[in-house]
Amino acid sequence: MTGVRNGDRVDLPVPAGTAGESFSVRVSGVSKTFPALRSGAPVVALDTTNLQFEVGRFTSVVGPSGCGKTTLLRMIAGLERPTSGAVTVAGEAVRGPSARTAMVFQAANLLPWKTVRQNVLLAARLRGKVDDRLRERAARLLTTAGLGQFVDSLPHELSGGMQQRAAICRALLVQPEVLLMDEPFGALDAMTREQMGNELTRIWAQNRSTVVFVTHSIPEAVQLSDRVVVMSPRPGRVVGDLLVDLPRPRTPEVLESERARELHHRIRAHFTNLES
């Protein structure tokens, strides 16, 4: 993968074979202010944010807690409205939730009365798309996530990490155009986190959804992404935008290379600059 660098800003080429709109998501001059609670002042979560997420690219967004990363995802998903500015997906203004997007939250949000299999198939069922092919795909995803023996279990019978794996499978099943992920691996142990990261990138390489992935982990961002966006403390602003020009697959040798270490250092440098 190649790109044109401009300091820490990057312009990425459109993936081969992509026609029409080159940006799946555009965030144009977006600010978000939440009303004051009791005697407190209004909270400005995001301030005049401009971002474009290219079709088929995997972008991670990193930044300190409270910098508006989750708010950004919720506006792309149509779960929040900007105070000012506009968000578009595939050239259409976002006015509410859309079948084009799927979101994995920090909490699993599984329906407690449905089995793991039923929860994973839920989004597809709501879209009227459940068939034998999707059932087989759900079974493969659950097996890969280590849940093959728990497909008929209820959520309360699973650990928190297992519940989150089921939620990730639910979002991946419908193969959305835009996949929004809000620290989805935070509740997983290190080994499962790495396995799910590898599985996520394998599935992404097959269907090329546009992924916007929020994480606090710089190594995870470098492992998974084509690009890393760095946000400032609240009110959130974009302070870095880096191309991750490492070859795929991201083997241990690639992730331990001099270039990978350089990328880690450049991302961390933004946080050091913000603190100084």
Image: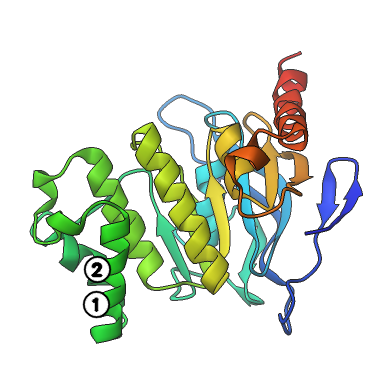
Residue 143 is labelled as none
Image spot of residue 139 (x, y percent): 24, 68
Please indicate whether residue 188 sits to the left or right of residue 100 in the image: left
The three-letter code of the residue at mark 1 reads Arg
**SS for tag 2?**
helix
Residue 126 visible (yes or no):
no
Q: Residues within 10 Å of mark 2 (few under 14, many from 20)?
A: some
Looking at the figure, which quarter contains the N terminus?
Answer: bottom right
Q: Are marks 1 and 2 in contact (CB under 8 Å)?
A: yes
Q: Depth check: give the residue in front, 194 or 23.
A: 194
The residue shown at (70%, 31%) is 264
Label 1, label 2: how far apart the Cα atoms are: 6 Å
Q: Residues within 10 Å of mark 1 (few under 14, many from 20)?
A: some
Residue under pointer 2: 139
Image quadrant occupied by the C terminus:
top right
Quarter residue 47 falls in: top right
Query: 150 and 65: which one is in front?
Result: 150
Report the front residue among 172 and 50: 172
Residue at 36%, 70% (x, y): give it: 173
Outermost residue, front side: 253
Is 225 situated above or below 56?
A: above
**Residue underneath mark 1:** 135
Colour mode?
rainbow
Image position, residue 100 (x, y; %):
49, 74
**Looking at numbered disc 2 in the image, what kind of residue is underneath it?**
Ala
Q: Is residue 193 left or right of residue 201?
A: left
Image location of residue 203, percent across then percent down: 48, 65
Q: Please name whichever residue, 73 or 260, is drawn nearer the observer in this view of the structure.
A: 260
Question: Above or below — where is 262 with respect to 244?
Answer: above
Q: Left or right of 212: which side holds 152? A: left
Q: Is there any visible trace of residue 26 in the rendered image?
A: yes
